[in-house]
Amino acid sequence: MIYIHKDDIPSVFVTYSQQEGAHFDDMPTEVKQTLRESLWREQGGICAYCMQSIKADGQSMKIEHFHARNSDNELDYRNLLAICHGGEDRGALHHTCDTCKGNREIHISPLNKADMLTISYTSNGEIKTSKPGRQDELDTILNLNDEYLIYNRRNKLIALKREISKRYKSRTVPVQYWKKVYDQYSSRESGPYSEFVGILLWYLKKKI
């Protein structure tokens, strides 16, 4: 997880949500696609929970209601996230993200900057939180320490370390370079985030 700053609400979505009798499930195809694209852009093309890469289409991503959907919040843009399909093809024990979460509530949110400051990782690829009582939400409700995700996060971190080691060999890596790489990975300006970017930013921030 990394912090998600909500962008401006798409005007077509605002117009639709203000219509009498508007519901999420009845949303016109073109409005839902605009919504997908907006959520995808503001999240840098990654799942709000596990940070796998997703595409802005109905096959690659789902629209998640962070707080379980009801008549009051189903069209609340601030409650909507773009997420992956949560390992639907990997068997129930390996379901992650909303596919595992269902309608259960979690209290650690990628929309809350303070919550995201509690997130850390191990060099083995595990995700942790120092927020009291919330580790179980990552482990059980979202299953973000599933072996598949741990393996891929670890490999991303190893690849980054190798790249930097190859560049500097036995020389000390200057702080300016760590900052440059951190800025590159943390920016959305050049396109989607790198997959599993959270563990990379955690590592780079430690080095800085």
Image: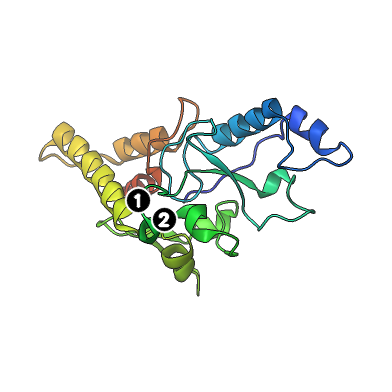
Q: For the residue carrying disc 2, how many other residues have a C-alpha within 10 Å: few (<14), some (14-19), or many (20+)?
A: many
Residue 206 at x, y percent in the picture: 33, 52
Q: Is residue 201 left or right of residue 163?
A: right
Would residue 147 be seen by someone viewing this image from the given angle?
yes
Q: Which of 174 and 163 is in front in this view?
A: 163
Q: Position of residue 166 (x, y in %)?
A: 14, 34
Mark sitting on residue 166: none
Q: Which residue is identified by label 1?
A: 90
On the question of residue 130 being in view, the answer is no
Residue type pointed to by label 2: His
Instruction: Describe the colour scheme in one phrase.
Output: rainbow
**Residue 101 falls left or right of residue 36:** left
Figure quadrant of residue 163 = top left
Q: Which residue does the image show at 42% across and 37% down from the upper left?
A: 53
Secondary structure under the numbered disc 1 in the rendered image? loop
Mark earlier in primary sequence (1, 2): 1
Per the image, label 2 sits on a secondary structure element best described as loop
Left or right, 78 with respect to 152, comes to right
Q: Is residue 50 above or below residue 159?
A: below
CA gap between label 1 and label 2 equals 7 Å
Using the image, determine if residue 173 lies above or below residue 125: above
From the viewer's perspective, is residue 46 above or below residue 71? above
Give the number of callouts. 2
Q: Mark 2 points at which residue?
A: 95
Amino acid type, callout 1: Arg
Task: Say whether marks 1 and 2 touch (CB < 8 Å).
Answer: yes
Residue placed at 13% from the left, 39% from the top?
Answer: 171
Is the residue 126 above or below the residue 203 in the image?
A: below
48 to the left or right of 165: right
